[in-house]
Image (tube, rainbow, N blue to C red):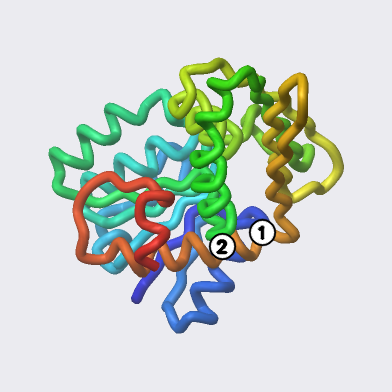
Amino acid sequence: MKILVLGRGKTGALVAEVAKERGHEVRSLASQDNQDGRGLTAELLKEIDAVVDFTNPHAVIANIIRCVESGVPIVVGTTGWLQHTEKVRELVKERKSALLYGSNFSVGMNFFFKAVQAMAPILKNKYRGNIVERHHVHKKDSPSGTAVTLQKILEEGSGQKVEVASVREGETVGMHLVMLDSAHDTILLTHDAKSRLGFAEGAVRGAEWIIGKTGFYEFPEIVDQL
């Protein structure tokens, strides 16, 4: 399979490495070579089976549009663009293309989402929910896309408002703490990433999964199928 990785940052570089280890042919495109998606030419994309995007919120929409309009499946690990979700869904449907989005491609985190979803109804029983997320100082979006997903899960599962606090320090890979607090006890659920390798592996497995499919998918929906 021929995979094009967009972004040569820490996670993008790991995605390329993991894809090669899994036997795929890999090409990479740095941000400076792909301003406004112009590096994603028709000539390049016709040679690619799937694209994996780990760029930034300012670049990702142009990249998505180029891939979707060319009919090339794209896996998006970039966060901070969800205000455009509905328009992207419509474009994917119109073009009969395929997009897989994950606010976090760690398989462990996606099962953590399921655990948090199971606990959400407790907020109806005089519990208060809070989320703390801690990431490295280079992270562009705040709160993290993962924290936004956790907030959505808790709020939709309980009808209660949940606050998010963000911390940016050092080279922290990513820690998410969900606190469910009452007058009688406190429940703490934590996911702490040891490295970016889990994100990279999940994204590559997602690229393998999306070949031959059409539609807009979110990683938690399909993680059981990997």
Q: Which mark is residue 52?
A: none
Give the structural element (helix, strand or loop) at label 2: helix
Residue at (58, 21) in percent of width and height: 125
Q: Nearer the viewer, residue 107 or 187?
A: 187
Please give the count of numbered marks on the rendered protein.
Answer: 2
Residue at (36, 69) in percent of width and height: 208
Q: Is residue 80 visible?
A: no
Label 2 with label 1: CB-CB less than 8 Å: yes
Give the residue pinned by disc 1. Answer: 196
The residue carrying pointer 1 sits among few (fewer than 14), some (14 to 19) or many (20 or more) residues within 10 Å by Cα, namely some
Q: Nearer the viewer, residue 89 or 221?
A: 221
- Residue 84: image location, x then y, percent: 37, 27
- Residue 5: image location, x then y, percent: 47, 60
Quarter of the rendering containing residue 161: top right
- Left or right: where 197 falls relative to 211: right
Q: Is residue 98 above or below residue 127?
A: below
Q: Nearer the viewer, residue 213 or 62?
A: 213
